[in-house]
Structure formats: C-alpha cells, structure tokens
Image (tube, coloured by chain):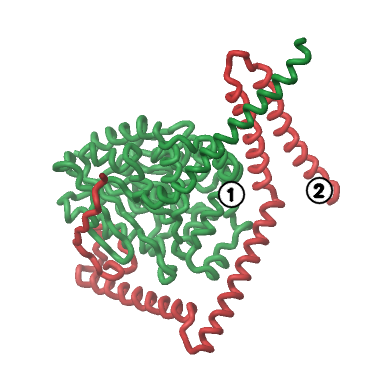
Amino acid sequence: MNEQTNEAANEEAANFQKIWMETMSKTMQAAFTFTPGAPAPEVLRQIRSGIFQALADSWEKFMRSPEFLESMKQWMEQAVTFRKTTNDFLGKVRHEAQAPSCDDVDTIMLAVRHMEKRLLDRIEQLSAQVNGSKPARTKGPTRSMKQPLSAKRKARTTTKSPPP
Amino acid sequence: MTNTTAPINFWIQWQEAALKESVAFTRKMTRVPTFWERVQSIRKGVTPSEVVYEEDRLQLLHYPGKGKPRYPTPIVFIYALVNRPYILDLKIGRSVVANFVDRGFDTYLVDWGVPLAADRHLTLDDYINGYMANVMDYVCERTGASQVNVLGYCMGGTMSTMFTALHPRRVKNLILLAAPIDFATKDSLLNVWTRAENFDVDKFVDTFGNCPPEFLQAIFLLLRPVGNLIEKPINFYERMENDQFVEDFITTESWLNDNIPVPGEVYREFVKYLYQKNLLTQNQMPVGKHIVNLKQITCPVLNIMAGADDLVPCSQGMPLTDLVAAKDRKTILLEGSGHIGLAIGGKAQKEVWPQACDWLAQRSH
C-alpha cells in the first residue's frame, strides 16, 4: 500500500517537474533567441506567458488529482451540512415566531405541483378519449401539463430603448 | 573610463525607468474612479427589441429590424439557464443577434428570467415541453410560419437538441453553438468534478434548492484559475489606458458576473442524467414522460464549436453529428476561440456568423 502511494507521489512529482523543465527550457530558448532589433518587452511577455502556461498546466493536473477531488468532496459536504443546519435553525426560529418557513412553502409548492400534474394527466386522458382511442400527437409530446404554467400568455409589446 | 561610467549609466537608466513606471501607475490609477460609472452605463442588449410574449418569468424578445423580414421562417435563440442571454447581443459590432437581424431574419430571443426559490421544482420537462413549446407555438401563430429555426447556445443548445428530437415537426433548421451533447469526455474539468463519486447532486439540491449563482461563478472561475485570477488582472492593468479595451473588458466581465440561480430540479436532472449518466447520447434521456431519441432529428443541423473552449470542449459537441439522422449537417470549428469568444469574439464575427447566416438563408425559404 505504502509502495503504491510512494509510486503515485513520485509520478506526480515527476509530472510536475516535467512541466516546469519544459517551461524553463522554452523560456531560455525565448531569451537566447532574442535579437537586438526585437523589442525587449515582447520577449519578457513571452517568458511571462510561458510561466503562466506552466502554472496553468500544474493547476489543471492538480485539480484532476484524487487528492483535490477528495478535498473538494469534503468541502462540499461541509458546505451542505452547514447550510442544512442553518436552514433547520431558521426554520425553528420561524416556527417559534408562528411564521411559515421555507420548508412549509416548499411543501405547499410541491403539493400544488403534484395536484396540477394529476389534474393535467387526467385532462390529457379525457382529451385522448374524446379524440379517439389514441392521444393526439400531431404537435409532438406535451409537458405533463398541456397549458402554460400560469396560462399567462400576453401579446404585450414593450419597446426597449434603441441604442443612441 | 568606460568601466566607471557603465554602472552610473545603468543606475540613471534604472531611475528613469522607475520614474516612468510610477508616473504611468499614477496615470492609470486616476482612471479607476470612472470605472464604476462605466459599469453603470453598460446596456444589456444593444439591438432594439420588444417583449412580445410573457409566461411566468420568461420573456420573449422580438427584434423588429429594418423593414420586413426577408425570410419566412423566424429564428428563435435559446440561451442557457446559468447566465443572462444578452451575451448574444452584447455590443454593437459584437452581436450575434444583430448579424441575423441585419440579414433580414425575423429574430426572437428567449430570456428565461431569474428563477426564485419557488421555482426550484421546475424540471427540464417544464422548460422543453412547456415553455419552449409554448414559445414556438406563439412565434408560429404570430408569423404565420409552420416551423421555426432554432439556435441554442451552451446549455440552451442541449435543450434545443432535446426539443428538436421531441418536436421534430416544429423545427426547420437547428443551429447549435458550443452545445454539450456527449458528457463521457474528461476533457473539461467540469466533467471530472461532477462525476457521481465526486459530487452528490441530490444532497446538494435537497439542501440548497436552486443552484446558487455564487457556486456556479466559483466553479467557472476555478476552471482556469491562473487565467482568471492572475493573467486577466495583469492584462487589464497593462491595457487600462486603452478605452476600447476597458469598455470591452467591463462589458464582458459584467456579463460574466451576472450569473443567475438554476432551478434545482433542472440542475439535478442535468447533472445526474447528463454529466453523470450521459443518457442523451444513449437515446435514454428522460424529459417528463418522454425519452429523447436523437435519431428523431432529421432537419438540417449546423454545429458550431470553439477549438479552445474549456467549458464545453469540442469532444463534447462533435459527436452530435453522428448521433442525429439528419442528412444535411455541417460543423464549423473556430480554432483558438473560447466559449464566449465564439459569440462575441472579433474572429467569430468575421468568420463564423456570416457563414452561419448564409447557411440558414439557403434553408429558410
């Protein structure tokens, strides 16, 4: 187990070293191929962008590594736990104050959506029965509800200000 | 003699350079207070438009253009749910929308609006078979056309693909812009991070409800940490005195920081069914009661991708060409361009959009 870990670590280190060796050699090449006529800042920019490229490559490699993925997972779990605790606490405070909490609103929303879905499914079935034995599919599939959520279709025309 | 003057000259030169640099720094810093004013003056969408249809938080924008449309089939732009859609109409000379409007297309853009906590239960079914289907119906009713052209960008491209597969008779031509289709690839960090073993999307959505915009922003920032946190500020500092550059920078950054929450259930479905199970390419993607079969797409398809896209790499969009049953299909790959550059980049405006307009014009009669 230890050997495997060491091997992986060595491989990581070798990859990291390779990226930087390549960068440094590119940087040196840029510096030595610098001709007196060429503007100096351009060479410096090339060197800088080489270093940034190497940095970016190292980061990319690191962000794909199991260590990073594991720490990201742990961090996410902590964030979720913290949020859950906060939600629970705020929910309790609201309940104590006899006010509805987010959870209560969510429960109502979900109940309304389920009711809406059941109702629209039933309407679809009835519509299919009226139209014949098969559901009408001329326009392709419909959402479980056939009408817009709030049936709020408006042909309102609000002109946005044209550019100066 | 030479030996004694050389160090003195070097010292004088160094002093001069340091003085020049401090003067330049001071000059640059005097411009900082004006930036806030510039941020405030940024307009979200430059082409004149009107809201012609509303449903819940959705608004459908119509771009009247100059004179009557030259083509009978209207085009509807579908943008992603993670950002605001004005990236497609960001600046004069950098607007995808303007390209189509100027060519005489009857152009519409769907603005999904900003979801509230109560919208956490909205699903892909609501968006694709609900809102999108209603918008297409409305556009057909308004224009008298029997079909519409659809252009989908990023996540909006994936949704447009699903819509076209589920409603093949409603779409005349499909244009996809950096649309992720095959999620099996590991080229993007996003694909690695969202794998089931690394990310528990159920726990996340159950706790947070909608996916918070700050979370999305942090993730997008982390995709290129060196570029976003080191190179970008340095480039900005160096070119602070170039008014055009500053304007472009502020406009783009304002849009980039204008993330919006993604409805929780949509986020869950997108991560679970696409990023984790890659169901779309297997023709097993569920949308409500229906299953998306990409072989149902028979209309002409134009697939536009960016060669240096770190969010949606080519390997994620390219497979679509072989997955659809369309005979008329074309791919445009813009080398060296990134995800946003594909829409607002100068190269894209010169090379891609005139080509895309030509392609659509030939197929819109």
- The chain to which mark 2 is attached is A
Residue shown at 52%/56% (left/top)? B216
The answer to whether residue B180 shows anywhere in this view is: no
Instruction: Say which chain is green.
Output: B
Say few, some or many: other residues with alpha carbon within 10 Å of mark 2 (under 14 / 14 to 19 / 20 or more). Answer: few
On the image, which quarter does residue B323 sit in? Answer: top left
Residue shown at 63%/39% (left/top)? A56
Q: Marks 1 and 2, Cα distance to the nearest angstrom?
A: 27 Å
- In the image: residue B358, left or right of residue B198: left
Say few, some or many: other residues with alpha carbon within 10 Å of mark 1 (under 14 / 14 to 19 / 20 or more). Answer: some
Vertical comparison of A123 with A18: above or below: below
The residue where tag 1 is placed is B222
Q: Tell me the mark number nearer the camera, choosing from 1 and 2.
A: 1
Question: Which x, y percent locates residue B153?
Answer: 39, 46
- In the image: residue B341, left or right of residue A58: left
**Callout 2: helix, strand or loop?**
helix
Residue farthest top in this picture: B1
Check residue A163 in the rendering and tell me which mark sits there, or answer none.
none
Q: Colour of chain A?
A: red
Quadrant assignment for the N terminus of chain B: top right
Check residue A5 in the rendering and tell me which mark sits there, or answer none.
2
